[in-house]
Amino acid sequence: MKTLIQYGLVALGGALGAIMRYWLGGMIAARLGTSFPYGTFIINITGSFMIGLILTLITERITIHPYWRLFFPIGFVGAYTTFSTFEYETFKAIEEKNWFIGTLNVVGSVVIGFLVVWLGVILARKM
């Protein structure tokens, strides 16, 4: 049975991840524009790196209370990353006949996302 503390950790992590996503997405859009979904792309890439790094550290390198898995990968990264937004922005690009942007978003997010998860795992294992 889940405790109130477990739900609270997921909620707190989720709130912080959502706030970080909102702030960073706005800052990226203001600096880079919106001709390509840069904010969603960068957030997904950094979220992929964070989850690779942190999950590897807490499962292979350091011993911490298992509740941190609730706070960080489930709560924070779960709210921080933007997969549904990524899907919608890709759909809109394709719908608007902008095949290049749609394809670049999919290929870039999947390939670079995988590479940075791998990088995070490698980095964590070297620590």
Image (cartoon, helix red, strand yellow):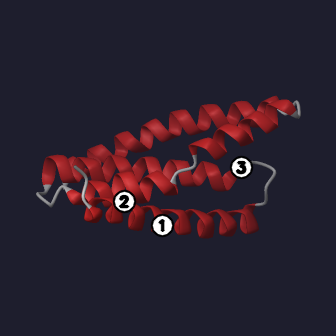
For residue 66, the mark is none
**Along the viewing direction, whichever of 21 and 66 lies nearer the viewer:** 66
The secondary element bearing badge 3 is classed as loop
Q: Left or right: 57 with respect to 42?
A: left
The quarter of the rendered structure image containing the C terminus is bottom left
The residue that label 2 is drawn on is 10
| Residue displayed at 39% across by 42% down | 117
Farthest residue, direction left: 63
Q: Is residue 126 visible?
A: no
Disc count in the image?
3
The residue that label 3 is drawn on is 37
Where is 78 relative to 100, above or below? Answer: below
Kindly indicate whether the residue at mark 3 contacts the one at mark 1 (C-beta within 8 angstroms).
no
Q: Residues within 10 Å of mark 3 (few under 14, many from 20)?
A: many
Disc with the residue nearer the chain's start (1 vs 3): 1
Q: Quadrant of residue 54?
A: bottom left
Residue 78 locus on image (x, y percent)? 45, 51
Question: What amino acid is labelled 1 in the image?
Answer: Ala
The residues bearing labels 1 and 3 have C-alpha atoms spaced at a distance of 23 Å
Q: Quadrant of residue 62?
A: bottom left
Q: Quadrant of residue 31?
A: bottom right
The residue that label 1 is drawn on is 15
Residue 89 locus on image (x, y percent)? 73, 42
| Residue displayed at 46% across by 68% down | 16
Disc with the residue nearer the chain's start (2 vs 1): 2
**Along the viewing direction, whichever of 10 and 86 lies nearer the viewer:** 10
Question: What amino acid is labelled 2 in the image?
Answer: Val
